[in-house]
Image (cartoon, rainbow, N blue to C red):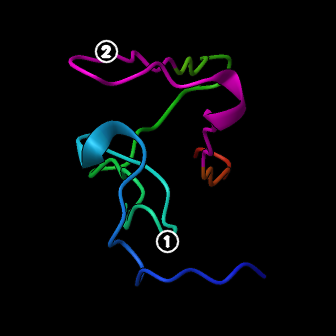
Amino acid sequence: MARFLDPPGAVNMIAEGYAIGGNYTQCDLKQPHMFDPAITFNEGEELSVAWHVIYEGAGSPITEELQEVGLILRISPMA
């Protein structure tokens, strides 16, 4: 396990902390983006997810290697 000199959240390396969701790491203390109320889909419906990244100033684009998306799904039969 890597050891870091900075405490959790003290360093922000990507997106300067402006993203709605993000990583919960030594770099960013981002909680997951949760929908309230939860989104409900009917049988056969589809969920598409897309990230749109804009960078300004001295920033640089996020490489594919640094991009990650996780989804938490709860699947239950609809009555």
Q: Residue at x 38, y 18 (%)?
A: 53
Corner quadrant of residue 14: top left
Counting residues from the N terminus, which is met first, the one under dot 1 or under dot 2?
1
The answer to whether residue 45 is above or below residue 78 is above
Q: What element does badge 2 sit on?
A: loop
The magenta segment: 50-71
Task: Identify the amino acid type marked 1.
Answer: Gln
Q: Position of residue 9 (x, y in %)?
A: 36, 72
Q: Position of residue 72 (x, y in %)?
A: 60, 52
Q: How packed is label 2: few (under 14 Cα within 10 Å), some, or many (20 or more)? A: few
Q: Is residue 57 magenta?
A: yes
Left or right: 64 as drawn, with respect to 11: right
Callouts 1 and 2 close, C-beta under 8 Å: no
The answer to whether residue 40 is above or below residue 13 is above
Q: How packed is label 1: few (under 14 Cα within 10 Å), some, or many (20 or more)? A: some
The answer to whether residue 26 is above or below residue 60 is below
Tag of residue 26:
1
Q: What element does badge 1 sit on?
A: loop
The CA distance from mark 1 to mark 2 is 23 Å
Q: Position of residue 67 (x, y in %)?
A: 61, 33
Q: Main secondary structure of the magenta part?
A: loop
